[in-house]
Amino acid sequence: MREKGSENVLYVHTFGEFYVTWNGKRIAGRSGAGETQFVSLLQLLLHDHGRGIERNLLEEVLFAGRDLQDRGHAMRSVLYNARKRLRKACLPEPEYIRQSSGVCYWTDEVAVVEDAARMDRLFQEVGAEEDPGRLLELCLSVCYCYTGEFLGTQAKALWAEKEARRYREQFCYCVEHAVELLREQKDYEQMEKLGLHAAKVHPLADWETVTMEALAASGRTVEARKFYDDTVSFYFQEQGMRPCERLTELLHSLGGRMEHSYTAFDEIQELLAEHGERVSGGYICNWPVFEGIYQMLVRMLERSGQSVYLMLCTLVDGKGNPVEDSSVLEQLTDRLCEAVRCSVRRSDVINRYGKGQYLVLLFNTTRESCRILQKRINGRFRSGRQRLGVRYHVKSVICTQKMEQKIMNWK
């Protein structure tokens, strides 16, 4: 698809994926044999093309790790083949790449438009702008110009890694400033959109908090809770950990703002009831709900004599180490969930704490009953001669609470 105004202009896309188009046709960036050197050459020459690249640097990048007797001859061969490919792509026929005093330049006769260069220009304007309205516009332009890591997976050379870090810092700076300005204007619609974009192009950096804040501030509680659950699940799958505490704080803040229209008591009780068919097994809930149940339970145990245990179930390999193979871990985690759910009682509470880990609150039970439960889970989880197993940590909730109380008294 031809880009607007692309006639006789070389368009260079560097964020997320590297490719070059001429009159709407991609001429570089395809994967395949013989592509690497040509692409590396264009990446160096076309990025900030007005400055030029020292020939020594070109040779270091193009021939890294290769023992060549005559680098000069190899370089001339690369340049010759590059010119040949550019002519075949129907570019005008100047020299394309000129050399002067040991520096290689892209020709001035073929216009180049690069997304990274545009982002640099916009960022310079951000630093000089004082008007809040124009500053917000510029910050958003920088943010949406950035569509992924500079050169993506191809950023292996030192020069590319440095540039990738620089553009990432520019992006983060502009996202933070744009969020501040949008927060002041209470423009939560744009704030949500920006948060989604930031999390997509710079994943696993907790930008989800921007979207969560926008949903919470605009009172969209149902969407906020679903977004929270989806985000926690994503972080578990990708990193085996939870997102930042700020996300949970925003979810908890919703509770204080949830208001309902006037409703009769019987109707309220009906809304609170668990609907659908009666499900056997334990009650599975997300972390905020589990945390709330645990904290309320600790308060209740201060006066009651109930026996409650907290159990952590962790998937381990044949040597007793936590399972880390990402290709099978998600499937095994789901299997462990089913084994736990079917083994505990309906009154027990279950939470997926991380990859290969589940927490269980066991009500009105004993240490011996916990051992029996562990055998029941093992029986449902293990299959054939597999060497995988489950490691258990069990502790009495009331004992933990008493110990915390003693520590408080000592203080």
Image (cartoon, rainbow, N blue to C red):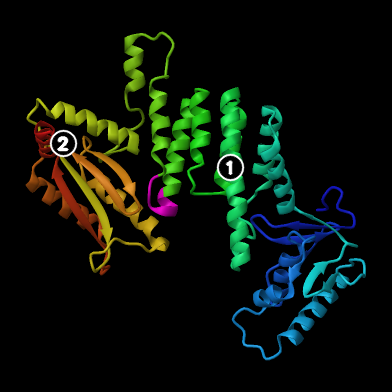
Which three-letter amino acid code belongs to the residue tagged 2? Phe
State the separation of the CA atoms marked 2 and 1: 49 Å
Residue drawn at point x = 56 percent, y = 27 percent: 183
Say which quarter of the image contains residue 107.
Answer: bottom right
Q: Quadrant of the C terminus?
A: top left
- Residue pointed to by mark 1: 173
Q: x and y percent of residue 207 in the render?
A: 51, 41
Please indicate whether residue 230 sits to the left or right of residue 318 in the image.
Answer: right
Whether residue 265 is situated above or below residue 236 in the rendered picture: above
Label 2: element kind: loop
The residue at the far front in this view is 101
Checking the image for residue 42, the label placed there is: none
Please indicate whether residue 194 sits to the left or right of residue 56 in the image.
Answer: left
Q: Tag 1: Cα neighbours inside 10 Å, few (<14), some, or many (≥20)?
A: some
Residue drawn at point x = 72 percent, y = 66 percent: 44
Q: Earlier in the sequence, mark 2 or mark 1?
A: 1
- Residue pointed to by mark 2: 363
In terms of depth relative to the viewer, which is nearer, 310 or 280? 310
Whether residue 116 is situated above or below residue 36 in the rendered picture: above
Q: x and y percent of residue 347 in the render?
A: 21, 34
Q: x and y percent of residue 158 in the render?
A: 59, 67
Q: x and y percent of residue 228 in the render?
A: 44, 37
Whether residue 199 is visible here, answered yes or no, is yes
Residue range highlighted in magenta:
236-242
